[in-house]
Amino acid sequence: MGISKEKCEQIYGIMGVKQSTKEEKVQQTENEPEKRVKKWRPSNGSEYDCFTFHLCNKCVKVEKCEIPFMAFCFDIEDPKYPKQWIYDEGDFTSARCTAYEESGESAG
């Protein structure tokens, strides 16, 4: 069934999922090489719904992406767990996907 768009928007505002552009990713890598990232995993179904609504559904790779499936199949400590879902150490609100490429279409 999923969660309503309104509820997702409310949670999304609290969660702070980031939609980094390629330029921002390069800048983050070049300007902040000491910043440590950790693998991210949704803590519940609502968090997953919001994350996929605001990132996955707007990504050009959404039709062929196996990252969400792999995240559910493997424990976060398993080497097969997707390395693309990350957050900055100490900042749980910075969850993002490094494979994200904006499609230019709006989700919903």
Image (cartoon, grey):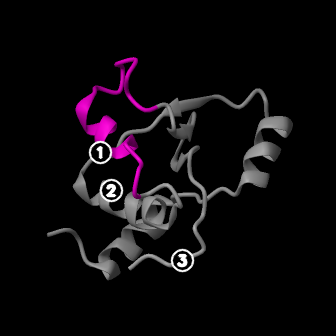
In the rendered view, does 15 fall on the left or right side of 32?
left
Residue 105 got which mark? 3
- Which residue is found at the position 56% from the left and 52% from the top? 100
- Which residue is found at the position 84% from the left and 36% from the top? 30
Identify residue type, mark 3. Answer: Glu
Q: CA distance from mark 2 to mark 1?
A: 6 Å
The x, y position of residue 90, in whole percent, is 56, 36
Q: Secondary structure at mark 1?
A: loop
For disc 2, the marked residue is: 47
Q: 101 or 48: nearer the eye?
A: 101
In the rendered view, does 72 fall on the left or right side of 13?
left
Q: Please state, as top left, top right, bottom left or bottom right, where the N terminus lies in the image.
A: bottom left
Q: CA distance from mark 2 to mark 3?
A: 22 Å
Rendered view: 103 above or below 64: below
Range of magenta residues:
63-82
Rendered view: 9 above or below 61: below
Q: Are marks 2 and 1 in contact (CB under 8 Å)?
A: yes
In the rendered view, does 46 fall on the left or right side of 88?
left
In the rendered view, does 62 fall on the left or right side of 60?
left
